[in-house]
Each structure stands twice: as C-alpha cells, then as structure tokens.
Image (cartoon, rainbow, N blue to C red):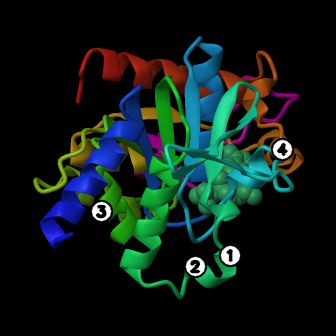
Amino acid sequence: MNIFEQRKEKEMKIAQSMSKIKYLLAVGSGKGGVGKSTVSANLAISLAKLGFRVGLADVDIYGPSVPTLFNIENEEVVGQEIDGKLSFHPIERFGIKLMSIGFFVDSTKALMWRGPMASNTVIQMLSETLWGELDYLIFDMPPGTGDIQLTLSHDFKLSGAVFVSTPQQLAVSDVRRAVNMFKNEGVNVPVLGLVENMAYFTPKELPNNKYYLFGKGGTENLAKELDIELLEQIPISEDISEANDSGNPISLIVDSLEGNSFLSLARKINEKLNNNIK
Ligand code: ADP
C-alpha cells in the first residue's frame, strides 16, 4: 500500500468509527492541573442528565484521569474480533461510555514517546472502540498544543472545543496559545468558549458569598480579547475534589452548587452546537 492509500484507509477507518456520533467535542487547556478532566467528566454526566447519549474518550497521554474519576482503574477492556479486526468495548459507568489511553499505555513512559507514535496510538484507540450511536463524544485532550491536539483536530471532524483555565495569569496565557491553535485556519475548529475552573470559593455557611481566591477577571478579559464567550465559572470546592477521588464525580449529586454549574455549562454547549453558534 502506498502512502496515499494508507492515508485514505486511515481516513475511512476514522470516518466509519465516528459515523454514528453527532457531536465530537474537545475539552482542552493550556497547561495541566487546571481541571480539564474534572470538567470533561462532569460535562459528560451533565449531558447524560439532559438526556443525551454520551461517550468520554480520555486521550491525555501525559496524565489519563478517567480511570480514577470513574473508579474503573481495575476494569479490563474487552476486545472482540469483528470481520477479522480487533475492536474494543468501552466501559460503561453512570450511563457514559468510557475509554482511556491509560488502559493501553504506561503514562510514566508517555512523556518519552515521540509525537507520531503517541498520536497513532490515540487514533487507533478511538477508531477501534465500539462507541455505537452517541449524541456526544467528549475528548479529554492532553494540555497544550502538541501533536495529538493537531492530529485530532485535523483527522477527526471536531464539532467544537472548549478550554479550561484557572484565574491565575500563567494559566490564562497558556490557554491563549491553545485557543489560537484551534482557531488557526489550517485547523479551524469552532471554539465554543472558555470555562474558568476554581474561579471562586463559596463557604457552605455563607451560600451567597463568593471569594475570588486567585484573582478576578483574568479569564473574562482573555475571553473578550479572543472574542469568545466565558461559558461558566466553576467554584473551587472540597466536594469536587473528594468526589473526584472517590470515583463519583460531583455532578451525580442532585442540586449541588457545583453540579448546577456543570449542568449550566452542558446546556450552553448544547445550545451553541445545536444553533451552530461560534
Ligand atoms: P487536569 O485534567 O487539567 O490535569 P484535573 O481535572 O485532573 O486537571 O484536576 C487537577 C486536580 O485538581 C485534581 O486533584 C482535582 O480533583 C482537583 N480539582 C479540579 N477542579 C477542582 C475544583 N473546582 N475544586 C477543587 N478541586 C479541583
């Protein structure tokens, strides 16, 4: 097979595996540790709460979090041979179809991977998973602007991307680079907006108060500068962190401040995609 035929075959494989999925949504960030996986997981649960069929693909090779966030670290991915080709069944939790690169690679070694090798593994995982019919497939991306982000935005027809940042200046300037990469003409993925995580703190005994621990206005100003919307501000909370550690993301709890914030984010994203708003 020559290089053009190989390329064609890869494109066909991707198109076929994604053919029953309505929206492919990337969740990105400028740097790690800002809450990108927390937002991806809670967004997945919130979209499912709104009645959508949802899948979550964890392609963050530098720090796959989905196995911990959904407490599926000890699960085994089951393969099945279909027409002579091996495919994988996603793991289901809380009605969400989950797959993580963490099941396939040793993340302590991922940093040493050369770009094309890592992105080929990601593409293989995504296109060999039996996603079935979905309204949303969320990609929990690696932070930054590397090879995987470029490959995914190029080879998968992403419906949109949202970016997570914290209020600190450094996180904000990193996210600027990531947003610009997606907006770039060669990539051209609609950037739906920014999510500010750990935006404020509300003590339980003072539910009407908001304390802006890491400063106020940074993400809002960046959104204005980049001409995109600040979609949601998510509070910093011990409950979010505990829920993450227990493998039961906060959005599973009915009517919490944090859960409502993620639900509002899910509604906005869905509205934007439905109305084709950029
Ligand atoms: P990323 O995917 O950007 O690397 P994570 O979602 O893994 O970030 O979050 C990093 C750490 O911060 C985790 O320990 C997580 O539980 C915690 N965390 C994320 N968002 C919040 C929040 N809003 N409040 C409290 N802790 C949070």
User: Quick one: quadrant of the C terminus?
Assistant: top left
The stretch in magenta equals 194-218
Q: Is residue 243 magenta?
A: no
Identify the amino acid type marked 3: Leu
For label 1, the residue is 106
For label 2, the residue is 110
Q: Nearer the viewer's eye, disc 1 or disc 4?
A: 1
Tag 3, which secondary structure? helix
User: Decide: marks 4, 3 in contact (CB < 8 A)?
Assistant: no
- First in sequence, mark 1 or 4: give its number: 1
Q: What is the spatial separation of the Cα atoms under label 1 and label 3, in whole angstroms?
A: 22 Å
**Furthest-top residue in view?**
51
Identify the amino acid type marked 1: Asp
x then y, percent, for residue 182: 26, 53
Q: Quadrant of ligand 1?
A: bottom right
Q: Is residue 132 above or below residue 140?
A: above
